[in-house]
C-alpha cells in the first residue's frame, strides 16, 4: 500500500479560496526590516544562498509549506497533498529596490507583490528578500501567504520558526524530504463519499447519549441557539455606506507607522480598557476625521468593523490553517471626545465577551465543515456583498524582546492584509519589542489619500496621550 497522504481544507479555509478572484487576492503577510549583519556583503548584496538554506532547514516543522492543492473529483472539494515538484527557489525570492531605496519604494514593492495572485498549482506562499534599502546596512523581508493556509496567529508561529531569540548565525543542516505519493482521484472520491455517508450514522449514534443527558443537552441547545442568534444579529444587517466601501479593484497600496507600546499602555492605564480598546478608539477617531474630510456627516453613522478573533486551542499552536472567528463591532466614529469614545468602546467589547457572537460564528463554521462545506463560503460572500461592516481591524500580539534572522536583528514589522469586495481599507497592528506597528492595506484607486488616514491615526494617538497626561495631572492635584 503506497504511503499517500492528504488533508481536507476546513470550511473556514475554503472561504478564502472561494472569495478570491482577479480583483481580490486573499493574501496576508508582513514587511519586516532587519539590520544587515553578516547577511549583507560589502557591496550591499544579500547572501541569498545562505538564506535559502536556512529557510529550507525550517520547513521540517511546517509540512504545509511543501504542499499544494488538489481537488476531489466530482465533488471538487480541495485537499492538501505533497508537492512532488517542490522548488524552494521559486518560493524564496531575491530582489533589489531601485535607488534611492527609500521607504516609499519599499511600500510600492509590497503593493505589487501582494497584488499578484499566487499560483494554485504550487504551495501558496512566497518570501521576498529585499536589498538596496537606503543606508546600505538593512534589508527587508516581504512574507506572503494565501489566507486559506494560514491565519494571523499561525502566521506568527511560522515567523517564530525562522526567527530566533539569540543572534546565532549557524545554519542547521536541512532534513532530507521525500514527498509522499499523490493519492488517486478515485481514492479521494471514495474517502470523501465515505466520510459524508458516515455523518448521519454518527448523528444517530449520539441520540441515546443525548437522551441520557437530556437536561444538560437542553441547556446546551438553548445556549447554542442563543449564540447563533447573536451571530446572526451581528452579521445580517447592513452598515451605512461610506467612501471606504466602493467596489474594490486589484491593486494594493500600503502605509505604516510605529508608536511606542508604552505610550499606548499608559493611555489604557490612565483612561481604562485594554490595549485593544485603545487601538479601536484611535481607529474610530481617525476614521471619523477622514470621513469628515471626505464630506461625510458622521453623526449617527452606523459604522461597523470586523475583527478576527482566534479560537485556536493551546494544543493547536504551531499548526497552520485557520482557527479564527470574526467579531462585528460598532465604532463610535462620530464621538469627538477621546475619553467618551474609549468608554463607548470599552462598554461594547465588554458586552461582546458576554455575548455568544464569536461562538455562534464558530458553530456555523463547524456545522458547515461537517454537513455542507460550501455553506460558510456562501455566507461569507453574502456578508461581503451586503456590506455587513465597513472596515476590518486586526491586532496581533508579538514578542516583546528582539528576534533575529541568522544574526540580523528585526527592527520593524508591519502586518499586511487583504480586502473584501466592498471594503477598501484594512488596518492591522502588531506589537513587537516595545513598539506597536500599524499597517494600512488599501485599494490604490479608491484611497489615493491613504496618507491622510495614517496621519489621522498619528493625530488621534497624540490626542489620547494628552488626555492621559491631563488625567494624571488632575489626579496629582487632588
Image: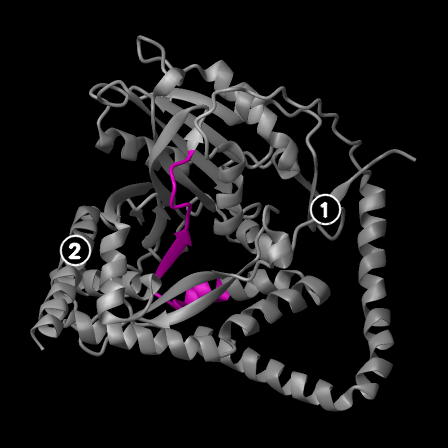
- As drawn, the residue found furthest toward the right would be 1
Q: Residue at x 29, y 60 (%)?
A: 279
Q: Residue at x 36, y 58 (%)?
A: 393
Instruction: Report the disc number at residue 362.
Output: none
Tag count: 2
State the extent of the magenta-drawn residues as a range. 381-403
Q: Is residue 180 left or right of residue 335?
A: right
Residue 173 showing in the rendered view: yes
Query: x%, y% of residue 27?
Result: 46, 44
Q: Is residue 313 left or right of residue 346?
A: right
- Give the distance between the C-alpha atoms of the residues marked 1 and 2, in whole angstroms: 45 Å
Label 1 element class: strand
* Quadrant (top left/top right/bottom left/bottom right) for the N terminus: top right
Instruction: Report the disc number at residue 456.
Output: 2
Q: Is residue 400 rendered magenta in the image?
A: yes
Query: x%, y% of residue 87?
Result: 60, 22
Q: Compared to 138, does 423 lie above or below?
A: below
Q: In the rendered structure, which disc, 1 or 2, sits on the residue that comes first in sequence?
A: 1
* Quadrant (top left/top right/bottom left/bottom right) for the C terminus: bottom left
Q: Residue at x 41, y 53 (%)?
A: 396
**Residue labelled with disc 1:** 7
How crowded pointer 2 is (Cα within 10 Å; few <14, some 14-19, many 20+) is rated as many
How crowded pointer 1 is (Cα within 10 Å; few <14, some 14-19, many 20+) is rated as some
Label 2 element class: helix
Q: Quadrant of residue 29?
A: top left
Q: Compared to 182, does 178 lie above or below?
A: above
Residue 298 showing in the rendered view: no
Q: Residue at x 35, y 57 (%)?
A: 423
Q: Compared to 408, does 147 lie above or below?
A: below
Query: x%, y% of residue 425?
Result: 31, 54
Q: Is residue 447 left or right of residue 337?
A: right
Query: x%, y% of residue 411?
Result: 32, 34
Amino acid at each position: 500500500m503506497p504511503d499517500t497522504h492528504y488533508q481536507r481544507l476546513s470550511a473556514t479555509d475554503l472561504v478564502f479560496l472561494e472569495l478570491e478572484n482577479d480583483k481580490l487576492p486573499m493574501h496576508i503577510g508582513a514587511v519586516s526590516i532587519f539590520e544587515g549583519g553578516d547577511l549583507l556583503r560589502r557591496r550591499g548584496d544579500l547572501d541569498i544562498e545562505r538564506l535559502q538554506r536556512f529557510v529550507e532547514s525550517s520547513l521540517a516543522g511546517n509540512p504545509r509549506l511543501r504542499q499544494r492543492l488538489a481537488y476531489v473529483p466530482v465533488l471538487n472539494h480541495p485537499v492538501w497533498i505533497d508537492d512532488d515538484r517542490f522548488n524552494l527557489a521559486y518560493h524564496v525570492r531575491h530582489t533589489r529596490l531601485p535607488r534611492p531605496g527609500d521607504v516609499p519604494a519599499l511600500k510600492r514593492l509590497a503593493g505589487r507583490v501582494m497584488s499578484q495572485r499566487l499560483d494554485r498549482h504550487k504551495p501558496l506562499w512566497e518570501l521576498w528578500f529585499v536589498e538596496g534599502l537606503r543606508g546600505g546596512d538593512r534589508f527587508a523581508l516581504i512574507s506572503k501567504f494565501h489566507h486559506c493556509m494560514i491565519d494571523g496567529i499561525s502566521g506568527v508561529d511560522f515567523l517564530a520558526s525562522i526567527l530566533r531569540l539569540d543572534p546565532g548565525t549557524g545554519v542547521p543542516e536541512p532534513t532530507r524530504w521525500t514527498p509522499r505519493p499523490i493519492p488517486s482521484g478515485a481514492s479521494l472520491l471514495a474517502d470523501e463519499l465515505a466520510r459524508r455517508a458516515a455523518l448521519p450514522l454518527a448523528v444517530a449514534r449520539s441520540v441515546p447519549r443525548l437522551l441520557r443527558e437530556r437536561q444538560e443537552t437542553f441547556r446546551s441547545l438553548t445556549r447554542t441557539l442563543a449564540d447563533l442568534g447573536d451571530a446572526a444579529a451581528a452579521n445580517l444587517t447592513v452598515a451605512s455606506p461610506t467612501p471606504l466601501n466602493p467596489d474594490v479593484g486589484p491593486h494594493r497600496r500600503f502605509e505604516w507607522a510605529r508608536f511606542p507600546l508604552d505610550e499606548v499602555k499608559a493611555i489604557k492605564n490612565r483612561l481604562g480598557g485594554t490595549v485593544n480598546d485603545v487601538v479601536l478608539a484611535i481607529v474610530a477617531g481617525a476614521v471619523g476625521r477622514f470621513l469628515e474630510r471626505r464630506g461625510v456627516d458622521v453623526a449617527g453613522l452606523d459604522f461597523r468593523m470586523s475583527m478576527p478573533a482566534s479560537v485556536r486551542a493551546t494544543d493547536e499552536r504551531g499548526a497552520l490553517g485557520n482557527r479564527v472567528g470574526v467579531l462585528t463591532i460598532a465604532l463610535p466614529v462620530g464621538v469627538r471626545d477621546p475619553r467618551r469614545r474609549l468608554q463607548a468602546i470599552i462598554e461594547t467589547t465588554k458586552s461582546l465577551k458576554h455575548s455568544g457572537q464569536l461562538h455562534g460564528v464558530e458553530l456555523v463554521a463547524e456545522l458547515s465543515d461537517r454537513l455542507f462545506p460550501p455553506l460558510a463560503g456562501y455566507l461569507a460572500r453574502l456578508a461581503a456583498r451586503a456590506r455587513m461592516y465597513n472596515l476590518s481591524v486586526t491586532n496581533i500580539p508579538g514578542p516583546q524582546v528582539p528576534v533575529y534572522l541568522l544574526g540580523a536583528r528585526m527592527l520593524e514589522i508591519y502586518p499586511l492584509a487583504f480586502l473584501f469586495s466592498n471594503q477598501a481599507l484594512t488596518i492591522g497592528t502588531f506589537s513587537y519589542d516595545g513598539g506597536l506597528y500599524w499597517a494600512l492595506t488599501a485599494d490604490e484607486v479608491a484611497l489615493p489619500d491613504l496618507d491622510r488616514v495614517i496621519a489621522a491615526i498619528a493625530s488621534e494617538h497624540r490626542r489620547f496621550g494628552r488626555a492621559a497626561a491631563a488625567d494624571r495631572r488632575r489626579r496629582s492635584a487632588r
